[in-house]
Amino acid sequence: MTTPKPWHARAEDLALPVLALAGALLCFGLFVWLAGKSPVQAWALLFKGAFGDAFSWQNSLQRASPLMLTALAVALPGRAGLTVIGGEGALVLGALACAALPLGFTPPANAWGSALLLAASAATGAAWVALAGALRQWRGVNETISSLLLGYIAIALFKHTVEGPLRDPASLNKPSTPPLAEGLRIGAIAPDSLLGDVHWGLAIGLLACLLAGVWLSFTANGFAMRVVGGNARAARLVGLDANRLVVLACAVGGACAGLAGGIEVAAVHTAANASLIAGLGYTGILVSFVARHNPWAIPPVALLFGGFGAAGSLLQRRMDLPDASVLVLQGFAFVLILAAEALRGRLFTLGWAVHIRRAVLPRQIKGNVQ
Amino acid sequence: MSADTWINLIIAVLGGAVRVGTPFLFVSLGECLTEKSGRINLGLEGVLVFSAMAGFGGAYLSGQAWLGVAAAGVCGALLALLHGLLCSLPRVSDIATGIALMLLGSGLAFYFGKPLIQPQAPQIPSLMLGGWSASPQVQQALAINALFPVGVALAALMAWGLANTRWGLVLRMAGDSSDAARALGYSVNGVRIAATTAGGFIAGLGGASLSLYYPGSWNEGLSSGQGLIAVALVIFARWSPWRCLGAALLFGGAGAVGPALQSVGVSGGYYLFNAMPYVLTLAILVATCSPRRAIAGAPMELGVSR
């Protein structure tokens, strides 16, 4: 063992997730190899499908934008000390709110109308996840279980509404709500450029991650929230209102997931239907854990997993792998990212690491390091 | 509705309580065993899906329903073993690992289960307890999954074993005070890994009951949260195997209301009735939990009750 150095913690923040993801890709390769396929081809297709050309970049960016928002729904409560995984439920209800609001009254068919719809989505999502936080703080109900149960209830409500009272009689094969008016939809950022179909949801997602990071890092309120998450007893001793802060974190997180649902309706599906229940909330959990609940780390991680999602259909087409292979890759990544935490604080001080460093690193680099 | 419809409805719900409740029973017994040792395994949802697939695959390939059941148990145990090992690492939370296992379990199940969606596999036999009655409804309601008596026996065995055997005592000690267990020279992690693995085996039998009895086929929507509900059931049952049995039947009944209403011709609100178990679970959690004290009977080391 050597003594830890100040740069170790920073380097580990980057090295551990990278190692874990590399390990997940390795496991996935092994898995594919056991199925009698070429792992090298699988890795190449994963990269090609995710980031190989302009079209796959567009696809990856499209998929990354809702993931950023659903990841925030896990990250913000996570920083306040709660493991809330209700992003899926908040997303579908947010989508439902967005699709249902124009049925009640006619919003102006312009950007203001879209903003109004998205606000409704965010408010619905916020209420749904805040409920899990409130049950935790005031009734002591485990928030992980309650948020997942609320997710199943939300999906049931969604299906009931979409296939029942709000069903558009014109949607025959696939029950849907009536489509949004043309003017209410969210369009592409720059349709004639390289960005292609990438819609404004990407900008909203990036902005949300940026603002969430600023909130946590640079405001007194965000700092108080992190204190509550780090040590609830210390927070109580200095007189912080933990209940309010925790519910606030859940509400803001839920608002992000609800927003994701609204954007999916307004920019992609144009109506609420079963295509929205695509596990975006669940992938968001993984994104948040890989980013260690750090809002600023979420966009690149979301892009990576959005890219894997985009590459899934390529794996299916070219290598005849089941469409669940991306789920398997995600599962490996999740398991390894948690296991990697065990190495935190020890990655550079374990005996083997020192040996490798002595053997591999040339002398002058070692000089710089020490 | 006429009186006859009502009676048919009630019989259908009671029969459904056993039919739908059997997976709940196994998963909640498995979770009860795991939690008694001081860890919570939220990943039993993943274990349930994966073992349902494995059970169906085993039965389909071997042509023997009971070999499928064994395969389901073994696969459930393997996945749970992964949970046990991961949680033994420093700074790894059992809740987060459970979420990861949910994702991994369903991912693996969907991957391997792709070719199993179409075919038929031999089913677990029914015990016909309704032969005395002339009514076909009663006969149908009393055709009981052969795994159900196994589950009841298991509940009895667990209740007796936890209270009266050395193994049971060590397990409960690891769950109530890891310091005491360590002081007596037991490996706390070892006990917990063993309990989690055994719990996974039991939950795997529940998976077999899903794919080999009711609904009796493999598809990707086979389990939607039953494993998770069962985890919450254990809190409701206050960590007693016998009360797990009661809770599983209650929830089986709640889950059977939707299909039973459909069978007598009420089809509106299908999804809402199917969401009943979730609502009921949530309501029960809200009613039984309290922020000020741990729930009576909770293992002291358990994170979920804090």
Image (cartoon, coloured by chain):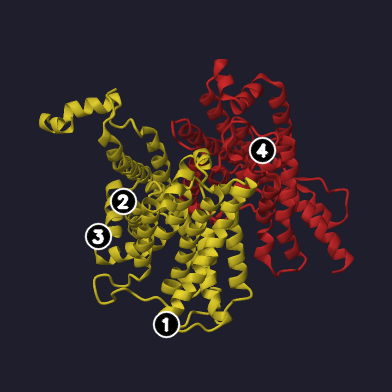
Chain colours: A yellow, B red
Q: CA distance from mark 1 to mark 4?
A: 53 Å
Circle 2 marks a residue in which chain?
A
Residue A185 lies in quadrant: bottom left
- Please determine if labels 1 and 4 lie on a single subunit: no
What residue occupies the far left of the structure in this picture? A364
The secondary element bearing badge 4 is classed as loop
Categorize mark 2 by other alpha carbons within 10 Å: few (<14), some (14-19), many (20+).
Answer: many
Q: Nearer the viewer, mark 1 or mark 4?
A: 4
> Is residue B26 shown left or right of residue B136?
left
Taking depth in this image into account, of A207 and B303 the one nearest to the observer is: A207
Q: Is residue B52 above or below residue A355?
A: below
> Is residue A354 shown left or right of residue B148?
left
Taking depth in this image into account, of B84 and B235 the one nearest to the observer is: B235
Quadrant (top left/top right/bottom left/bottom right) for the C terminus of chain A:
top left
Lower position in the chain sequence, tag 2 or tag 1 = 2
> Is residue A216 shown left or right of residue A100?
left
Q: Residue B67: percent from the left, percent from the top?
A: 59, 38
Mark 3 in CB contact with mark 1 (< 8 angstroms): no
Quadrant (top left/top right/bottom left/bottom right) for the N terminus of chain A:
top left
Q: Residue at x 44, y 77 (%)?
A: A114
Q: Which residue does the numbered mark 4 point to in the structure image?
A: B293
Lower position in the chain sequence, tag 3 or tag 1 = 3
- The image's mark for residue A123 is none
Residue flagged by tag 4: what amino acid is it?
Answer: Arg
Taking depth in this image into account, of B54 and B240 the one nearest to the observer is: B240
Categorize mark 1 by other alpha carbons within 10 Å: few (<14), some (14-19), many (20+).
Answer: some
Residue flagged by tag 3: what amino acid is it?
Answer: Gly
Residue B172 lies in quadrant: top right
Q: Which residue does the numbered mark 2 point to in the structure image?
A: A42
